[in-house]
């Protein structure tokens, strides 16, 4: 009986050691500059978007934090944010989803002409289970006129799908208008 307990204990210690080694390796690899450069190159090759971030950090709870983030396409800014937090869970790594995406002081540049153009296909189909935006700005370009800016936006959304043909229902608070905006 004692040898069975001893063998079970040794097997358990072995598996815990393997899991800890894999976990620490993941943290070290993601925090390395080489993987970050590879991710930037893959994003540009697959979607055409260029990502520049001041600092990348994956913490032990699998939350990736990027500071001073700029995303552009063809030298046109698409997104600028002070901080972006991407929370992953083990299931999301395999299902093309992000558990939580938090944007702090983002500025999102949208061109309505490109948004309604259904001929452009997005090669990056991903879903976000929880999207949080704090103190955001949306710069909306309508035709050739001056862009319209919406400032101090805060938004919480669930189950947002990008690059897929699904509907989008959003409700955002707009303090400068003392009201809410709903996009259905």
Image (tube, rainbow, N blue to C red):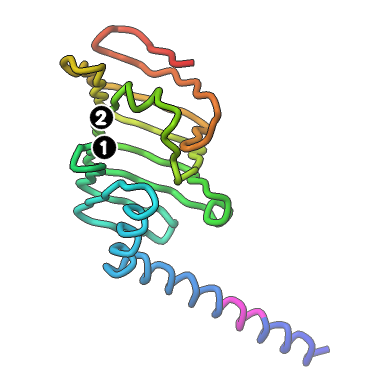
Image side of residue 43 versus residue 146, left or right:
right
Q: Residue at x 35, y 53 (%)?
A: 43
Q: Are marks 2 and 1 in contact (CB under 8 Å)?
A: yes
Residue holding disc 2: 109
Image side of residue 85 versus residue 33, left or right:
right
Q: Tell me the SS state at disc 1.
A: strand
Q: Answer with the quarter of the image where residue 144 lies.
A: top left
- Quick one: which residue is furthest to the top in this view? 178
Q: Position of residue 137 (x, y in %)?
A: 24, 25
Q: Which residues are magenta?
A: 12-16
- Quick one: which residue is furthest to the front in this view? 119
Q: Position of residue 54 (x, y in %)?
A: 19, 53
Q: Residue at x 46, y 28 (%)?
A: 157
User: In front here: 23 or 73?
Assistant: 73
Q: Answer with the quarter of the image where residue 35 lies.
A: bottom left
Task: Name the chief secondary structure element in magenta.
Answer: helix
Question: Which label is found at residue 79?
Answer: 1
Q: Quadrant of the N terminus?
A: bottom right
Q: Earlier in the sequence, mark 2 or mark 1?
A: 1
Q: Is residue 115 above or below residue 19?
A: above
Spatial CA span between label 2 and label 1: 6 Å
Q: Tell me the SS state at disc 2.
A: strand
Q: Is residue 113 above or below residue 23?
A: above
Q: Answer with the quarter of the image where residue 70 lies.
A: top left
């Amino acid at each position: 009986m004692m040898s069975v307990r001893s063998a079970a204990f040794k097997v358990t210690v072995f598996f815990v050691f393997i899991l800890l080694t894999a976990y620490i390796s993941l943290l070290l690899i993601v925090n390395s500059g080489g993987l970050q450069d590879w991710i930037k190159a893959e994003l540009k090759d697959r979607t055409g978007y260029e990502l520049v971030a001041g600092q990348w950090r994956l913490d032990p709870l699998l939350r990736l934090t990027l500071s001073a983030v700029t995303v552009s396409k063809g030298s046109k800014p698409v997104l600028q944010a002070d901080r972006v937090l991407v929370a992953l869970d083990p299931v999301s790594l395999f299902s093309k989803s992000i558990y939580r995406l938090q944007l702090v002081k983002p500025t999102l540049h949208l061109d309505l002409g490109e948004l309604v153009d259904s001929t452009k296909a997005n090669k990056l189909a991903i879903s976000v289970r929880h999207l949080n935006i704090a103190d955001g700005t949306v710069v909306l370009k309508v035709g050739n006129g001056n862009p319209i800016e919406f400032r101090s936006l805060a938004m919480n959304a669930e189950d947002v799908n990008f690059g897929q043909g699904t509907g989008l229902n959003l409700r955002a608070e707009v303090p400068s208008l003392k009201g809410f905006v709903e996009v259905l």
